[in-house]
Amino acid sequence: MGALLSILIYGRQCLNSFYAKLTSQGPQTRLLTFCFRNLFRRKIRTALCILGVVIAVTFVIAVGATTMRYTAVLQEMNVLFNGQAIVVSKDAIIIQAIPISGGMLPQNSTLEKIRSVQGVSEAIPVLFVTSAGPQPLAQPVPVNFTMGIPVEDWNLILGPTPLRQNGRFPTNDSVNEVVAGASIADQYSWTVGTEMQVNGYTLRVSGILDTKMALLNRCVIMPLSLAQNVYNYPQSVNIIAVKPVQNMAQQNLTETIKEKIDYVDALTETQRNDIIQPILEQVQTWTVGIEAVTFIISLILVMTVTVMNVSERRRDFATLDAMGAPMSYAFRIVIVETLLMGVLGGVIGIAFGSLTAIVLASLYTNIPLAMFFPSILEIVPPLYMLEIFAAVVSVCCGGGIIPAINAMRMRIAEVLRAEY
Amino acid sequence: MKIRTVNLTRLFRVGSSEIAAVKAVNLEINDPKLIAIMGPSGSGKSTLLNLIGLNDHPTSGEIFIDDADTSQLSNRARRKIRGTRMGFVFQTFNLFPTLNALENVELPMALINEPQEEQKHRAMKLLEMMGLAHRHNHRPKQLSMGEMQRVAIARALANKPEIIIADEPTGELDSKTAKDIISLLQDINKQQKTTVLVATHDERIIDAADLVYTLQDGKLKLQN
């Protein structure tokens, strides 16, 4: 009891000392207090300026984070087929390795032809469907997927992807077993053993993938034959992943496949990246452009407000000069004031921006908002928040430079003369 | 502090013509006296005070402080003199509206990095001297005009200056408060041996001043 009391007393002393330090009138604290009060003297103007910065930061964070998220997902789409060429129907439209529309390939005949090409080590048929789950969802952007892969080839596509506790991958004997991504499983409250009806088939969840990959998180993976039955694509696939033998260049292999089979297109990993790269670069350029314009508008806003603040306080700055204050003092006052606006606007803007980013993600994907909260730092990475915070604080300080130089040059003789 | 001006002139360009606000002024201040500079509005009183207070540069002529030519001083040195050896009192008080009375008086000390405890102690003492200790926590807008001017005088005294330069210190005050302020400036001069240089057109200061100068069209004359 005595020890607890001592701890409480010590804690209170620490708090008091911290508060005393915080409110003490040391040179830096005095400047900070002075600037805070100056800003609060013009409450509405300061609030409107901060609101402007908040809106700008919210917009930048929301646009930036959303773009980053989709860029990351697009880049991830190639990861499953690392080191493999892919063969798709000639009229297929693909993003990275994933066909989003276009024709199907007859499974057996195409596989046979590919396997006969010299240099092919493995050829794995995959059926990729942009749908999953028990009920059809409106998907403005496809977010739920089904992959059908022959059971014996799962490790070639999924690699060493772990499963959540008690889960297991389907075996050759499985009739209706599937594994589901964690995100889709959490959304529909699936656990190991859950049964669901899809297109008249009863599917049983045998495992839940434990991975950070966005694509796999939203995927239901099942044996190829089961996927073909459920989605009514008998003996058809839309991707064939081709693994070359050692020392065989993917480029040579794809050229040969295209020569031999006239209804397919074959793409190496580099070619797939090359298709998406210009789009990603354009998206990146537009995002940077939007951010730059937004920050320039913020800079003009902060500069306008600060010019007004400084011109209204000409006498104060001139009095400081008459009192022998160093020239840098007036400069520091103005810069600290803009810095405070930047810090406040930045912090509130980042909070609102992060919230907006997950609301947007939820709206576009139809995934409940609550599911995004735990992964908010994945959607808006802390480093990105820090970057934007540094940028907005710099922009606000930048907006204060010209008014600060004006404040620094104010002389009492001139100010008094101007007043008369 | 010895101040001497030699042929001090300050011209202002207005449009295409030049106006001499101060014309060849020769003034010598040696002992701590209460000196009044009288003259109507626009006669150049404030300009002369700004020149002597090193807030402005003369067009021609020199200002010597302790026999050193101030035209040779760097801006930093001029600031140092203003901050440590001079105190300024303005007609419109020029208090910082976001600081309370105590903080306003502490500010000149903070600018020369006086220890924090010393700032507070001396500022409180000065406010006590002005009869405003009980108002130390009040902001300028919560004070009367007379109280504001007394805070401004306390602020001017903060760094123990050798000269107080007061530009129309009673200009905004009613007659009773003006009388109090004049008497306060007189006390400061007598008790603290501080030179007080006052620009005014308040006739009451004539009785209190040791020396009275008149400034007419930029020319300074000693009045008997």
Image (spheres, rainbow, N blue to C red):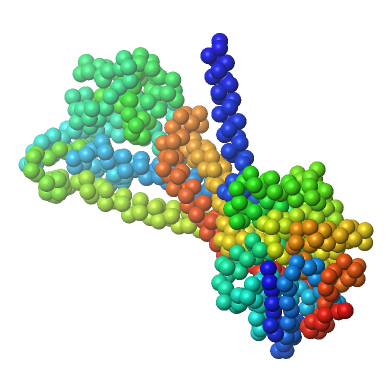
Q: Residue lying furthest bottom in this view?
A: B16
Q: Is residue B113 left or right of residue B7?
A: left
Q: Identify which residue is drawn at 43% across, 40% down.
A: A382
Q: Is residue A231 above or below residue A298?
A: above
| Number of numbered callouts drawn | 0
Q: Quadrant of the N terminus of chain A?
A: top right
Q: Is residue B104 left or right of residue A294?
A: right
Q: Is residue B14 visible?
A: no
Location of residue B71 by image quarter: bottom right
Q: Residue lying furthest top in this view?
A: A1
Out of A376 and B89, give the one closest to the viewer: B89
Q: Position of residue A7 (x, y in %)?
A: 54, 19
Location of residue A177 by image quarter: top left
Q: Is residue A108 left or right of residue A392?
A: left
Q: Residue lying furthest right in this view?
A: B176
Q: Quadrant of the C terminus of chain A?
A: bottom right
Q: Identify which residue is drawn at 44% across, 36% down.
A: A377
Q: Is residue A237 visible?
A: yes
Location of residue A261 by image quarter: top left
Q: Is residue A274 above or below residue A112?
A: below
Q: Position of residue A78 (x, y in %)?
A: 27, 41
Q: Position of residue A135 (x, y in %)?
A: 44, 26
Out of A320 and A168, give the one closest to the viewer: A320
Q: Position of residue B56 (x, y in %)?
A: 66, 74
Q: Is residue A105 above or below residue B196?
A: above
Q: Is residue B57 left or right of residue A141?
A: right
Q: Identify which residue is drawn at 36% across, 42% down.
A: A72
Q: Identify which residue is drawn at 63% across, 66% down.
A: B81
Q: Is residue B152 above or below residue A231?
A: below
